[in-house]
Amino acid sequence: MDHEPSGPIASLMRELGKLPGIGPKTAERLTHHLLAAPRGRVYALADALRAIKDSIRQCRQCCQPTENELCDICSDPRRDGSVICVVEQPRDVAALERTATYRGLYHVLHGRLAPLDNIGPEQLTIDRLVQRLRAGGVQEVIMATNPTLEGDGTALYLSSLLAPMGVRVTRLARGLPSGSGLEFANSQMLVDALEGRRSF
Ligand SMILES: [Zn+2]
């Protein structure tokens, strides 16, 4: 029977190796880097890691991570509350915000419908989105899920759910690299996709 190496060094390597894009070699290099780094810097990293779990929660309205009850975007009176852009992940909000073009609000689903992985509507923040529409004042919902099979399926599902609620449901224009995520699109592509959006 294999025994996994134990002790703090082995466990740090193991945890680092679970992060995306970090293989065993990089995990080992980072571990040795941290072993040699000044105590203050390593503690600052540990504190930052703790803080993202202890002080960050979901925005009450759009479900993106925030320190406050409402995120900076939802609490900004200059944003247009009549438009909601629906995205899969918080990093998609970041990508759209970098375009500095979109002035509406967002809704973060925290995933996409994936029947094969048993991810259904109840695993996403769809209920919260429906509540927002019921509260009134929303005229348009822009589907900005990723241009993948599951992203498209999610957008289609949401459009049939939301359209009867009397809002205009639109979809980002084609042109984003198919099969990839919004986060990989450059700002001009996202601006074009937003401006060329069409009704379902
Ligand atoms: Zn928010």
Image: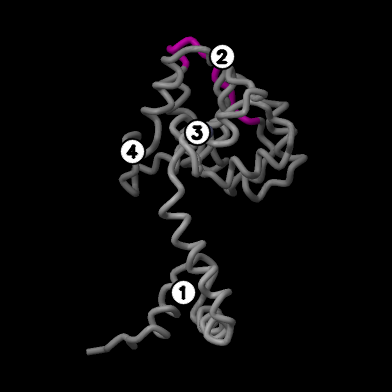
Q: Which residue does the numbered mark 1 point to in the structure image?
A: 17
Residue 70 numbered tag? 3
Count of number-bearing discs? 4
Inspect the image, locate mark 3, and give the three-letter code of the amino acid beneath it: Leu
Q: Residue furthest top?
A: 166
* Separation of marks 4 and 3 at Cα, in angstroms: 26 Å
Inspect the image, locate mark 4, and give the three-letter code of the amino acid beneath it: Gly
Residue 111 seen in this snapshot: no
Q: Which residue does the numbered mark 4 point to in the structure image?
A: 120
First-in-chain label (1 vs 2): 1
Secondary structure under tag 2 reads: loop
Q: Select label 4 or label 2 by which is in front.
A: 2
Inspect the image, locate mark 1, and give the three-letter code of the amino acid beneath it: Gly
Residue located at (59% from left, 40% from top): 93
Examine the structure image and report whether residue 166 is included in the region drawn in magenta. Answer: yes
Residue located at (68% from left, 46% from top): 185
| Neighbour tally class for label 2: few under 14, some 14-19, many 20 plus, Cα within 10 Å | some
Residue 139 numbered tag? 2
Q: Select label 4 or label 3 by which is in front.
A: 3
First-in-chain label (4 vs 3): 3
The residue range painted magenta reads 163-172
Q: Are marks 3 and 2 in contact (CB under 8 Å)?
A: no
Inspect the image, locate mark 2, and give the three-letter code of the amino acid beneath it: Gln
| Residue 158: quarter of image | top left
* Separation of marks 1 and 2 at Cα, in angstroms: 45 Å
Secondary structure under tag 3 reads: loop
Q: How is the image coloured?
A: one colour
Q: From this view, report whether residue 91 is shown above or below residue 27.
A: above
Residue located at (62% from left, 44% from top): 94
Examine the structure image and report whether residue 30 is included in the region drawn in magenta. Answer: no
The picture places residue 6, in percent across and down from the top left corner, at 32, 86
* Separation of marks 4 and 2 at Cα, in angstroms: 26 Å
